[in-house]
């Protein structure tokens, strides 16, 4: 389902519109969205991105231009999720605060990665498949593992950032 409150730029391709869930979000020009993707309200996807199937982009996530999101990538926006409020009632929007996440232009996120809230994934950075990102990823860094750690530099990194930061 694509809600009427989705702001979609020209040239967006949604492979199976009946098999996605998009509401209250912004999608940039020429971005491609795969099957079984959910993008929630107040999420923003830049131009020329690819969001692969079965990925979840929650409220508070900003993905800049030219980002690749692999299959089954999960973003989160709450460090302490609970079903119930302190008084035992079901939580509402008033019971928690969205923690924002940013993915900078040109980054790539491998399949089945999990991105915890409050992090920034830097320009041109690469998150390996299955990684769990718990802290900021520097520009052009390659991170892998659980929790994700820097294991290299992207091949297209500018010369001044070519060293591995540990």
Image: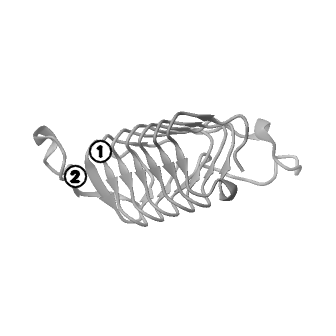
Residue at (21% x, 49% y) in the render? 165
**Which mark, by number, is residue 124?**
1
The reply to whether discs 1 and 2 touch (Cβ–Cβ < 8 Å) is yes
Q: Nearer the viewer, residue 44 or 6?
A: 6
Q: Quadrant of residue 111 in the image?
A: bottom left
Q: Residues within 10 Å of mark 2 (few under 14, many from 20)?
A: some
Residue at (41% x, 61% y) in the render? 147
**SS for tag 1?**
loop
Where residue 8 sits: x, y (%)?
58, 35
Q: Residue furthest front?
A: 11
Q: Nearer the viewer, residue 48 or 69?
A: 48
Where residue 163 sits: x, y (%)?
13, 48
**SS for tag 2?**
loop
Residue 95 appears in the rendering: yes
Q: Quadrant of residue 104 in the image?
A: top left
Above-or-below relation of 14 to 139? below
Earlier in the chain: of badge 1 and badge 2, it is 1
Q: Nearer the viewer, residue 128 or 72?
A: 72
What is the distance, in whole Å, between disc 1 and disc 2 at their CAs?
Answer: 7 Å
**Which mark, by number, is residue 54?**
none
Q: Quadrant of residue 144 in the image?
A: bottom left
Residue at (69% x, 46% y) in the render? 2
Q: Nearer the viewer, residue 118 or 52?
A: 52
Question: Left or right: 116 with respect to 131?
Answer: right
Q: Total label count?
A: 2
Residue identifier under label 2: 154
């Amino acid at each position: 389902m694509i809600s009427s409150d989705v702001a979609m730029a020209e040239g967006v391709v949604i492979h199976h519109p009946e098999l996605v869930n998009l509401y209250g979000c912004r999608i940039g020009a020429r971005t491609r969205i795969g099957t079984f993707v959910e993008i929630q309200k107040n999420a923003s996807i830049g131009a020329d991105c690819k969001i692969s199937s079965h990925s979840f982009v929650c409220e508070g996530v900003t993905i800049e231009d030219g980002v690749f999101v692999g299959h089954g990538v999960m973003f989160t926006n709450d460090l302490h999720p609970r079903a119930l409020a302190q008084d035992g009632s079901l939580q509402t929007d008033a019971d928690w605060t969205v923690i924002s996440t940013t993915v900078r232009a040109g980054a790539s996120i491998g399949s089945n990665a999990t991105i915890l809230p409050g992090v920034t994934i830097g320009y041109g950075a690469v998150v390996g498949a299955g990684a769990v990102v718990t802290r900021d990823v520097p520009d052009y860094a390659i991170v892998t593992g659980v929790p994700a750690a820097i294991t290299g530099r992207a091949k297209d990194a500018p010369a001044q950032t070519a060293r591995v930061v540990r």
